[in-house]
Amino acid sequence: MEAKATKEFLEGDESVLPGKRTFLLSRSTFAGSGQYTQHWLGDNHRTWDDMRTSIAGVMNFNMFGIPLVGPDTCGFFGQNVTITQKLCTRWIQLATFYPFARQHRDDPGGGGENAPYAMDEKY
């Protein structure tokens, strides 16, 4: 209901953005709320398991009526080591098939650089 109210406020007749489309991103959604907001799968870990789980997460939310959904590509929590660069490269390749992908990481907690240009040349 918060996403619906926000969208109606932003796009309504007397809104602050008349005639414009909004981009609302939420981590808390329900079936069918895709008409009001997009969904992000929440903070995940920089692991192969979390990368695999993101596939099911995106597909499930698509079935729930939320077409624009995606994870934190490369993971939110985790250290930046060589194996992580390989993982992150694969995750970026996978994310090209997701409706929504973003680089979002836990910098203070030890998260490493996710940008492809910052990785070793072989990646």
Image (tube, rainbow, N blue to C red):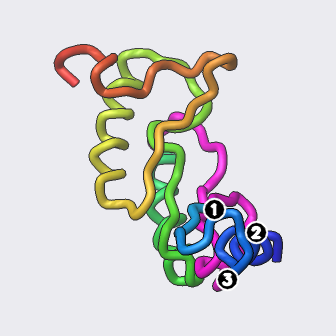
From the viewer's perspective, is residue 50 above or below residue 21?
A: above
Could you tell whether 45 is left or right of 117 in the image?
right
Tag 3 and tag 1, C-beta contact below 8 Å = no
Write down the region rendered in magenta: 25-48
Q: Is residue 3 visible?
A: no
Front-most of residues 15 and 43: 15
> Is 55 a magenta residue?
no
CA distance separating discs 2 and 3? 18 Å
Query: Where's residue 17, x and y in %?
Result: 63, 65
Give the residue at mark 3: 31
Could you tell whether 52 is left or right of 35 in the image?
left
**Dominant SS in magenta:** loop
Q: Earlier in the sequence, mark 2 or mark 3?
A: 2
Query: Where's residue 81, x and y in %?
Result: 43, 15
Element type at mark 2: helix
From the viewer's perspective, is residue 90 above or below residue 30?
A: above
- Dot 2, how many residues are within 10 Å of its Cα: few (below 14), some (14-19), or many (20+)? some
Q: Say which amino acid is labelled 2.
A: Thr
Give the residue at mark 2: 6
Q: Earlier in the sequence, mark 3 or mark 1?
A: 1
Q: Say which amino acid is labelled 3.
A: Ala
Q: Which mark is residue 24?
A: 1
- Dot 1, how many residues are within 10 Å of its Cα: few (below 14), some (14-19), or many (20+)? some
From the viewer's perspective, is residue 116 above or below residue 72?
A: above
Q: Say which amino acid is labelled 1.
A: Leu
Q: Residue at x 57, y 21 (%)?
A: 111
